[in-house]
Amino acid sequence: MPRGAAWHSLPHPVNEVAARTVVGMMVGLTVVIIVTDLRWLMFVLTYGFLARVLTGPTLSPTGLLATTAIAPKTIRRHEPMAGPPKRFAQTVGLVFSMTALVLAYAANSLVATRPC
C-alpha cells in the first residue's frame, strides 16, 4: 500500500489479471449456488461484493486471494487498468446480489406461510 494510503482506500490503477481472477471466482460461486441451491452462500457472495465496493481487496477474501496469491504468484502478469470502472462493476454486482438475496429469502418466506 502506498505511503499515506488509508486501509480502506481503493487501488488505482488495478491489476486487470487480479480483477479477472476475482470475476472467475464470483462466477464459480454463483454456479455453485445455483446448482446446489445453498442459499446461505448468497450471503458470502453479497459480502464479497460489499467488501470490495467499500475497501477494494482489503476485506474481501477473494480479493485478497486474487491480489496476493493467484495473480502475482501463479499467473505472474500485471496489466494496469483504471480502478473506477472496476469499482462500478463491483457496485452493480452488489446491487444484483443483494436483490437476489432479498428475493430468495422473501420468496421462501412467502411460500412457507402460504395456506394450502
Image (cartoon, rainbow, N blue to C red):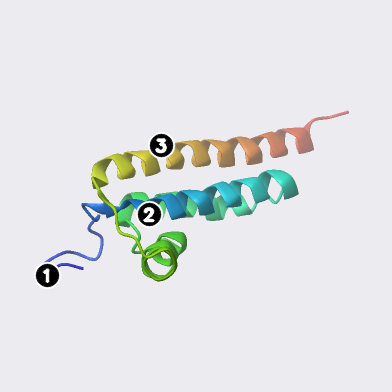
Residue 39, position in %: x, y?
66, 48
The relative height of residue 52 versus residue 84 in the rendered view (above or below) is: below
* Of the pair 84 and 55, the residue shown nearer to us: 84
Local packing at callout 2 (Cα closer than 10 Å; few below 14, some 14-19, many 20+) is: many
Q: Residue sitting at 78 percent across and 38 percent down?
A: 112
Mark 2 or mark 1, which is nearer to you? 2
Residue under circle 3?
A: 92
Q: Amino acid at mark 3?
A: Val
Check if mark 1's residue and mark 3's residue have beta carbons within 8 Å: no
Q: Residue sitting at 36 percent across and 67 percent down?
A: 72
Residue under circle 1?
A: 3
Check if mark 2's residue and mark 1's residue have beta carbons within 8 Å: no
Q: Earlier in the sequence, mark 2 or mark 3?
A: 2
Classify residue 43 as left or right of residue 82. right
Q: Earlier in the sequence, mark 1 or mark 3?
A: 1
Mark pair 2, 1: CA separation: 24 Å
Residue 54, position in %: x, y?
32, 52
Q: Secondary structure at mark 3?
A: helix
User: Toward which corner of the image does residue 55 lie, by quadrant?
Assistant: bottom left
Residue under circle 2?
A: 17
Mark pair 2, 3: CA separation: 20 Å
Q: Residue sitting at 41 percent across and 61 percent down?
A: 60
Residue 96, position in %: x, y?
49, 36
Per the rendering, the mark at residue 16 is: none
